[in-house]
């Protein structure tokens, strides 16, 4: 456990997971925090358990409940006799709210509620090291992450980006892809992409106010491979909801 922090890659490479889910191991042999144990894949579960076994105490933290992050939580928890903390629900037996702190091995992480990817998404801020464990709120490559699935998700996501700007950050550790060594630039990049898509949707709806989802897809994205069309349609639905939401005083 000489490297800090270290990660194990679950190897579940894909269009939305990049090189795979990174399970972060934070702390030392006196106490270890496992951030996002990853999918329920036997080889990965065994690797996480093996890496964590030397620690005197272990605690599992979830950023959210998607299976590529939390699927292996039960198996890892059972093998290590470790509690699971994170957003309420699923296998979590220690619910965490915004501002709650967890510590182990000389490391203290504070939960930061960052809805958008999911309504209950948490990042974990290591204030002493000016580091953020970002789950799926930001990816290590590109300029976008999945924001869809519930009303208000786009507004939530933009507000969460703004909140992270107010933290002292020197590095962001995403769950997919390499570290983001310039947090301010990364936050700007992800916001610029989202706001550009918002304006594209707004412009298309000015021209075609009754556009069908397929018509909006063509106007904003053009031709897309069939493998990503469903995801694009859902993302556009969230953007449309943001553009068409009632203006409140």
Image: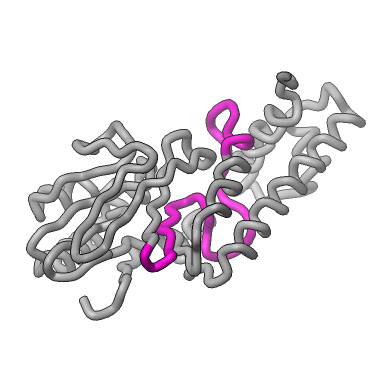
Q: Main secondary structure of the magenta part?
A: loop
Q: Residue at x 57, y 34 (%)?
A: 153
Decide if residue 113 is in sight here.
yes
State left or right for residue 29 relative to residue 190.
left
Q: Residue at x 52, y 68 (%)?
A: 180
How many numbered discs? 0
Q: Position of residue 162 (x, y in %)?
A: 60, 47
Identify the magenta region: 128-156
Q: As rendered, which of 134 and 170 lies closer to the eye? A: 170
Image quarter of residue 210:
top right
Q: As rendered, which of 80 and 167 lies closer to the eye? A: 167
Decide if residue 234 is in sight here.
no
Q: Does residue 206 show up magenta in the picture?
A: no
Q: Position of residue 10 (x, y in %)?
A: 33, 62
State left or right for residue 6 relative to residue 75.
right
The quarter of the image holding the C terminus is: top right
In the figure, 154 relative to 51: above or below? above
State left or right for residue 249 relative to residue 41.
right
State left or right for residue 116 relative to residue 97.
right
Residue lying at the far right in this picture: please name it: 207
Q: Residue at x 50, y 39 (%)?
A: 115
The quarter of the image holding the N terminus is: bottom left
Q: How is the image coloured?
A: one colour
In the figure, 54 relative to 215: above or below? below
Q: Residue at x 48, y 68 (%)?
A: 171
């Amino acid at each position: 456990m000489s490297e800090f922090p270290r990660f194990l890659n679950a190897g579940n490479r894909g269009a939305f997971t990049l090189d795979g889910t990174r399970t972060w191991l934070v702390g030392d042999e006196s106490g270890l925090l496992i951030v996002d144990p990853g999918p329920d894949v036997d080889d990965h579960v065994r690797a996480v358990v093996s890496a964590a076994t030397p620690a005197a105490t272990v605690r599992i933290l979830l950023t959210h409940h998607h299976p590529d992050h939390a699927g292996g939580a039960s198996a890892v928890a059972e093998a290590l006799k470790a509690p699971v903390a994170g957003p309420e629900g699923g296998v979590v037996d220690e619910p965490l709210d915004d501002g709650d702190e967890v510590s182990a091995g000389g490391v203290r992480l504070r939960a930061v509620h960052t809805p958008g990817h999911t309504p209950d998404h948490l990042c974990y801020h290591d204030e002493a090291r000016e580091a953020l464990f970002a789950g799926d709120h930001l990816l290590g490559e590109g300029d976008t992450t999945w924001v869809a699935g519930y009303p208000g998700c786009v507004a939530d996501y933009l507000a969460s980006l703004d909140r992270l700007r107010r933290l002292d950050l020197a590095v962001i550790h995403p769950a997919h892809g390499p570290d983001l060594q310039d947090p301010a630039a990364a936050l700007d990049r992800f916001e610029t992409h989202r706001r550009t898509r918002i304006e594209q949707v707004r412009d298309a709806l000015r021209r075609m106010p009754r556009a069908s989802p397929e018509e909006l897809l063509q106007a904003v994205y053009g031709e897309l491979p069939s493998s990503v069309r469903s995801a694009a349609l859902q993302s556009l639905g969230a953007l449309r909801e943001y553009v068409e939401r009632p203006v409140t005083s």
